[in-house]
Amino acid sequence: MAEEILRRLDRIEATLRMAFTPQLEQARTVIMADKVNAAILEAATDWVPTTKLQQTVAKQTGKGERSVRDRFPALIRQGVLEVRGPEKRPEYRRTGLV
């Protein structure tokens, strides 16, 4: 039963990706045009602690860690970054949406 549900959800996801390809590509272009956003998403391919992510991206972009951290809420709202864990020690991972 669970496998059937997962198979159907995968089919729904594939259908939506096909239907909204132009919009997803446009969103990807806009999001990835910003070097900080791009660096965050490139560094968060798997769950990464907030401190490590901030330090990595700050070093790559020359921005401050606070500036990097301030980007997280917008990327989460856009559905391209997800968060888990306690508020004081969250971890982030890109969703793969774009």
Image (spheres, rainbow, N blue to C red):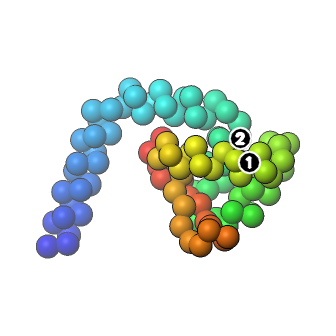
Q: Quadrant of residue 89?
A: bottom right
**Residue that appears at 40% across and 28% down:** 23
Q: Is residue 23 left or right of residue 42?
A: left
Q: Which residue is mark 1?
A: 68
**Residue that appears at 52% across and 57% down:** 82
Quadrant in which the N terminus appears: bottom left
Q: Residue 39, labelled with which disc? A: none
Looking at the picture, does residue 48 appear above or below residue 15?
below
Pointer 2 with pointer 1, Cβ within 8 A:
yes
Looking at the picture, does residue 48 appear above or below residue 37?
below
Badge nearest the viewer, 2 or 1 = 1
Q: Which residue is mark 2?
A: 36
**Residue that appears at 75% across and 56% down:** 54
Q: Is residue 36 left or right of residue 86?
A: right
Whole-angstrom CA distance, mark 2 to mark 1, is 7 Å
Looking at the picture, does residue 28 appear above or below residue 84?
above
Crowd rating for badge 1 (residues with CA inside 10 Å; few <14, some 14–19, many 20+): many
Instruction: Look at the image and tell me whether residue 60 can be seen.
Output: no
Residue toward you, 89 or 39: 89
How far from the left and from the top, in percent, is residue 12?
Answer: 23, 48
Q: Amino acid at mark 1?
A: Val
Q: Quadrant of residue 75?
A: top right
How far from the left and from the top, in percent, is residue 47?
Answer: 58, 65
Secondary element under disc 1, as helix, strand or loop, is: helix
